[in-house]
Structure formats: C-alpha cells, structure tokens
Image (tube, rainbow, N blue to C red):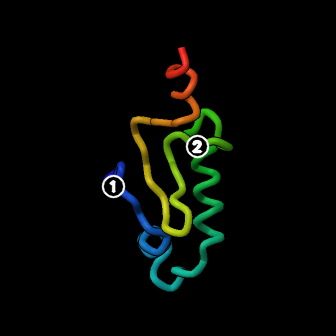
Amino acid sequence: MRNAGKLVTRQDLLTEIWGAQHVKDTGYLRLYISQLRKKIEPNPAHPRYLKTEPGMGYRLDIGGTDGASEAPEASR
C-alpha cells in the first residue's frame, strides 16, 4: 500500500519479505502473489489491482483500472 501505483521490483519484495538471502527465490513470490490475488481480485486470472510488470515486478493499482473492463463502455 505504501507504494500504490509505483512499480516494486521482485528483488525489493523478496528482500523486504524474506530477506536478502532469498532474492533469487522468485517461486516464493509468485506463489504469494497468486494467493493474494485470489483474496483481492474479482477475477484472479485477469488481475485488476495487483498487476505484473513482466521482467520487472508488480504494481498495485488501487483504482482498479482494467482496459478489458473499460473497452465495452467506450463502444457504447
């Protein structure tokens, strides 16, 4: 929540949560993010709030903007 809207790298998350010795253990992080999405996302397969930035990390979008959900509105 402190970094809502900002990119947080995988390395930063791993270090903050499990310590520097786990900076390469991305499996832990993927599992944790998956479980978190199941709790907060309306559809975890298509995240609206907790977004992955490929090759970089994650971004929390509190506004929940999702291009897929906005597209139908634009066509009306």
Q: Quadrant of residue 47?
A: top right
| Mark whose residue sits in front, 1 or 2 | 2
What residue type is disc 2 on? Pro
Examine the image and state in which quarter residue 42 appears: top right
Residue on which disc 1 sits: 3
Instruction: Measuring from the top left, give residue 17's x and y in whole percent.
Output: 46, 68
Q: Residue furthest right?
A: 45
| Residue extending furthest toward the front | 75
Q: Residue at x 60, y 73 (%)?
A: 26
- The percent coordinates of residue 62 (x first, y second) are 40, 40
Residue under the point 51% across and 59% down = 53
Give the spatial CA distance, label 1 vs label 2: 18 Å
| Relative side of 41 to 17, left or right | right
Identified at 35% across, 49% down, the residue is 4
- N-terminal of the pair, mark 1 or mark 2, is 1
Under mark 1, the amino acid is Asn
Q: Which residue corresponds to mark 2?
A: 47
Image: 26 above or below 8? below
- Tag 2 secondary structure: loop
Query: Residue pushed farthest left?
Result: 2
Q: Residue 14, percent across and down?
A: 49, 72
From the top left corner, tell me how far across and down residue 34 is, in percent.
Answer: 64, 53
